[in-house]
Image (tube, rainbow, N blue to C red):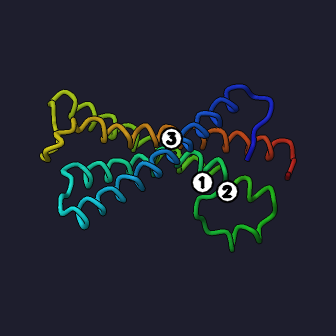
Amino acid sequence: MKVTGRPLLRFIEQLNRLGSLVSQCCLVLLLVLVFHEVIARYLFNSPTLYSVELSEYLLILLAFIAAGWVMQEDRHVRMQSFVHLLPERMQHFLACLTSGIVFLFCGVLIWYGFKAAYIAWRGEYHSSSLLNMPMWVPYLIIPLGSLLLALQVIVQFCTHVDKLLTGDNR
């Protein structure tokens, strides 16, 4: 769903495209990391100490940072069998309603995610592994990804409201 004419909405879409690129890089890095771990463990009998933990963090980053881009490309899973039977205006109304619900859910994830990251930062929490990663870093991934998703939900909400008000069903 591409937006034209509104600089702020276009900026949000560019931000989500950047999130998509970060996710793609994380996927490649995850592939290399797991491949390296398999070779090190099974060929050289020398497993790494960091591979599993970094893989988990990369997987979380990959999923959350790409969520806004997935919404932008209209690729999220949804039930459409009933909605397609409704008139176009009702479909846009339901899309606005759904966007509001998703926005509220993102708000909860953003609020509690930042709260958890702040507590981990203030408490100087670290992972219990030998990597000793400060836990506020992976905790921060969830609210940042949710923020990108929430911003994209705003873009979609505005698009559907425009279609409702103008009667444009494209």
The 10 Å Cα crowd at callout 3, few under 14, some 14 to 19, many 20 or more, is some
In the drawing, what numbered circle is on residue 22?
3
Instruction: Decide which of 9, 168 is in the foreground and name it.
Output: 9
Measuring from the top left, give residue 129's x and y in whole percent: 14, 47
In the drawing, what numbered circle is on residue 98?
1
Q: Circle 1 sits in a helix, a strand or a loop, which is it?
A: helix
Q: Residue at x 66, y 43 (%)?
A: 157
Q: Quarter of the image holding residue 132?
A: top left
Measuring from the top left, give residue 139's x and y in whole percent: 30, 41
Q: Residue at x 46, y 42 (%)?
A: 146
The 10 Å Cα crowd at callout 2, few under 14, some 14 to 19, many 20 or more, is some
The 10 Å Cα crowd at callout 1, few under 14, some 14 to 19, many 20 or more, is some
Q: Circle 2 sits in a helix, a strand or a loop, which is it?
A: helix
Measuring from the top left, give residue 105's x and y in whole percent: 46, 48
The kind of residue on which mark 2 rests is Leu
Q: Between label 1 and label 3, give the one nearer the viewer.
A: 3
